[in-house]
Amino acid sequence: MDHTMFGVGRASLETSLKKATRRILPLLFICYFFAYLDRVNVGFAKLQMQSELGFSDAVYGFGAGVFFIGYFLFEIPSNLILHRVGARRWIARIMITWGALSAGMIFVSGPTSFYVLRFLLGIAEAGFFPGIVLYLTYWFPSARRGRITSLFMAAIPISGLIGGPLSGWVLDAFQGMHGLAGWQWLFLIEGLPTVALGVLVLVLLTDRIADARWLDVGEKRLLENALKRDLPRHETSRLGSALKNSRVWTLSLIYFCIQMCVYAISFWLPTLIKAQGFRSNTTVGLVSAIPYLAATVTMLLFGRSADATRERRAHLIVPVMMGCIGMAGSAWFPQDSVMSLVSLTLAAMGVFTALPMFWPLPSAFLGGAAAAGGLAMINSLGNLAGFVSPYFLGWMRETMHSSSVALYVLSAIALLGAVLVLRVPAKLVNC
C-alpha cells in the first residue's frame, strides 16, 4: 500500500468533511433553533396567557403536550416522504407550515383553540428532526456523526439560552402594544422568521452529495466512498424488518425516558424558576439561560469525546444519570432557590447532552428505507413523552400543589433509561 497516497486521501477526506460541515451545519442549526423555539415558547407564554385566559395547570399541560399527538401520528409518513422527494423541498414545506401555525397561536382564545393549534403545529413539524438525522447520514460517516449530531442538536440548549431571555423580555416589553398581549407578540415574533427560513432552505440546501455544486468531483468521490464503507454495518435496510426489530423498540423506550426529562425542563422551567420568587418575566428569562448555557458546553464536550474514543455507552449513561440526580435534587430542595437552580442545571446538562449521544446508535444498524421509517418511529414513540411529561407534571402540580413528587418520578424514569442502555449490544455502542 502506498502510505503517502493513503495519507493524502485521509487529508483530502478531512478537508471534504469540513467543507460539507461548513456548508450544511449552519443552516440546519438555525432551522432547528427556531423549530425548538417555536415548540417550547409556550412555556414562557404560559406566564401570561394562563391567567389571562383562565387556564389551569392541567389545561396548560395538556395543550403543551397535545402537540406530540399530531407529531406522533404523522412522523413516519413525513420521513418516508422526505426520503422519496428529498430533504430540500420537504424540510422547506415543514418549516413554512409550522412557522405560520406558530405565529397563528396569537388567535388562541380558550382551551379548545389552544388544543387545536398545538395539535396542528405537531402535524406540521412532524418529520423535521428525524428527517435531519436521516439527512446527516447521507453526508457524514458514522465515525463523525457524534460530533456532527452534537453540533446540530446544540440548537436545543442554545434556543433556551437565547430564547429564554428574549421571550421574557418580549412578554414584558410588548405587553399591550397595538392591543396585543405580550404572549401574542411572543408567538408572532418567534414564528414568522421560520417561514422565511423555509424559503431559504429551498434556495440553499442540497439533497445529496452528487447534487453539490460546491464540491468538486474528487471531493464527492471521497465522501461517497467513506459512506460506502459504512454500508456493511447496516444490518436492517427494509422498513418492515426495522419495525419488528427488538432493538428499535428498546431504543424507542430509552429515548422516551430521556425525553420525559427533556420536556419537563423545556415546558416547565420558567414556571419552576418563577416559583423560587423571581417575579419579573425578564429576570425569569435571564435565570433560565443558566441551565441551557451549561448544557450547551456539556453537549459539545461529550460529542467530541464520544467520536474520539469511539465509545457510546458511557457517553450516554453518564448524562442520563446526571439528569436522574438533577431531577431528584430539584425535588429535594424545593425551597432553596440556589440548590434548586443548581439541580435543574445539572439535569439540563445531562438530558440535553443525552440527546445527541443517543442518535448514533440507531443509525449504526438502520439503512435505506429502514433508516427513514425506523428513525422516525424511534423519534415519534420517544416524543410521546412530550405529551405525557408536561401533562403529568401539570396534573401533579394541580393535585399535590407541588412539583416534588413528579420530579422524583421523572428521576426514576431517567434511571430506567440508563439501565436500558446496558441492554444495547456492544457493537452498537462502540461505533
Image (cartoon, helix red, strand yellow):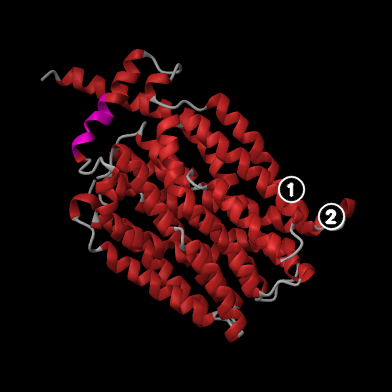
Q: Which residues are magenta?
A: 225-232
Q: Is residue 317 above or below residue 130?
A: below
Residue 333, image x and y in percent?
Answer: 53, 81
Above or below: residue 273 compared with residue 145? below
- Prevailing secondary structure of the magenta residues: helix
* Image vertical order of residue 406 relative to residue 236, above or below: below
Please, is residue 346 above or below residue 56 in the view?
A: above
| Residue at 29%, 51% in the rendered image | 243
- Locate residue 263 relative to residue 53 in the image: left or right: left
Name the residue that disc number 1 marks.
Answer: 188
Tags 2 and 1 touching, CB below 8 Å = yes
Res 412 → quadrant: bottom left
Where is residue 359 shown, x and y percent of the image?
36, 49
- Give me the residue at 64% from left, 74% from top: 57
> Which residue matches tag 2?
180
Q: State which quarter of the image contains the C terminus.
A: top left
Residue plotted at (74% across, 58% down)? 108
Q: Which quarter shows the N terminus?
A: top left
State the separation of the CA atoms marked 2 and 1. 10 Å
Q: Indicate the position of residue 42 as horizontal and vertical percent values.
A: 65, 59
- The kind of secondary structure element at disc 1 is helix
Q: Is residue 115 left or right of residue 316?
A: right
Of residues 229 and 248, the one drawn nearer to the viewer in this rendering: 248
- Residue pushed farthest top? 217
